[in-house]
Amino acid sequence: GESVGLHLPTLSVQEGDNSIINCAYSNSASDYFIWYKQESGKGPQFIIDIRSNMDKRQGQRVTVLLNKTVKHLSLQIAATQPGDSAVYFCAAVNNYGQNFVFGPGTRLSVLP
Amino acid sequence: DVKVTQSSRYLVKRTGEKVFLECVQDMDHENMFWYRQDPGLGLRLIYFSYDVKMKEKGDIPEGYSVSREKKERFSLILESASTNQTSMYLCASRRGAREQFFGPGTRLTVL
């Protein structure tokens, strides 16, 4: 079946460094992709999304890169801060938004 | 801001009990979803609803049922709770094909 997976379950970075979180998906028909941030004890929150006809999208301190050739997307967080500590997961959306497939998540820890 | 609320943050129930998890959204979204979240497995869709009184099975509906009597409210029901239903339950809503907005989650423990 369809799947979305992350390469690393945990990631530790020094405060101020850049973070890169990766995600792979299986369905080449996915329409767009979303990155979520989930802090401890809270529900997931939308960070950024990217449509399948794009290869890069930037937000505030975050950039998402999409490589459709290898079915891979990444989330880059610039100048990582303690408040960025959370679980990050990606979702692949297809069938005109009818189907969301979520990855298992990467726990990002920011070291002082 | 869209607000999705869930009736309980933490619940402890015994095997065989009937459990109700309530979800309310305040943005008039047509679509509402129930997921469970387990370590290493990501979010798995239990049931969803595209309109009042409509319900569709997701990927793991066994052992669950749902009710959507009003547009803003979507309830998840565990008819007879079992220990393998211990999990984090997340409700979400969205309008059309846009991003989903999640509630804070209910951590259910079944003893």
Image (spheres, coloured by chain):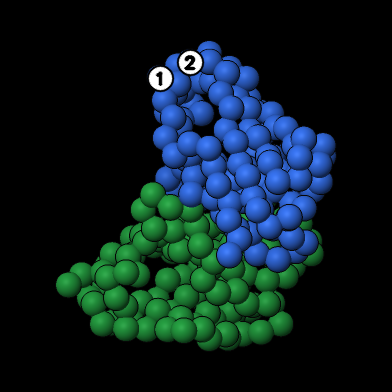
Please count the marks in the image.
2
Task: Identify the image quadrant of the N terminus of chain B.
Answer: bottom right
Residue B59 drawn at (x, y percent): 67, 41
What chain is colored blue? B
Are tags 1 and 2 found on a single chain?
Answer: yes
For disc 2, the neighbor class at 10 Å (few under 14, some 14 to 19, many from 20) is: some
Circle on res. A98? none
Which of A56 and A7 lies nearest the eye of the viewer? A56
What chain is colored green? A
Residue position marked by numbered label 1 in the rendering: B111
- What amino acid is at disc 1? Leu
Which chain letter matches label 1?
B
Query: A8 above or below B41?
Result: below
Q: CA distance from mark 1 to mark 2?
A: 6 Å
Residue position marked by numbered label 2 in the rendering: B15
Circles 1, 2 touching at the beta carbon (< 8 Å): yes
Query: B103 above or below A11?
Result: above
